[in-house]
Amino acid sequence: MGACAFGGCQRGTSLLHPGAILAAGGRPMPDNPRMAAEPALWYVYLLECRNGSYYAGISNDVDARFQAHLAGKGARYTRANPPVKLLASRAYPDRAAASKAEWQLKRQPRARKLAWLLAVETPLPV
């Protein structure tokens, strides 16, 4: 016991789950080093397209996502109907909440989307 197929594994560890990984100074590293200390906000945004239609999407960086849409690297819809301006965005605490709000917004008729624009401070009904 004590040696694994790849040599030197201690009892109770594996290559897939080696235990805590220590950073310099012996501090445990977070599971995902790229993860921020605080969770990033996610946003639902609404674009106006060249043909007059609206496009709703989510992102944790609205400006970068809008630039991607402008460059033709965004959604398939905005490649065919390029956006002309960002109308509004609203912050949500996490991706799941933003996705749910986006789904609700996309199901609304144009008049309700306009109301959403005018009431950016109030969340969509659940």
Image (cartoon, grey):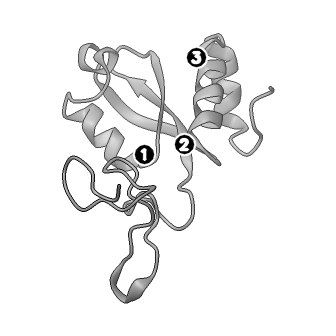
Going by the image, does 69 lie left or right of 104?
Answer: left
* Residue at (34, 39) in percent of width and height: 66
In the rendered view, would you say 76 is above or below 4? Answer: above
Q: Earlier in the sequence, mark 1 or mark 3?
A: 1
Residue at numbered disc 2? 43
Q: Which mark is residue 12?
A: none
* Viewer-proximal residue among 80 and 38: 38
Q: Cβ–Cβ below 8 Å for labels 2 and 3?
A: no
- Provide the secondary structure element on which disc 2 rests: strand
At label 3, counting other C-alpha atoms closer than 10 Å, the crowd grade (few under 14, some 14-19, many 20 or more) is some
* Residue at (66, 13) in percent of width and height: 108
Give the position of the N terminus as an image quadrant.
bottom left
Q: Earlier in the sequence, mark 2 or mark 1?
A: 2
* Viewer-proximal residue among 10 and 30: 10
* Viewer-proximal residue among 18 and 115: 18
Q: To which quarter of the image does residue 85 belong?
A: top left
The kind of residue tagged 1 is Val
Give how far across and how far down residue 62 sits, in percent.
Answer: 42, 45
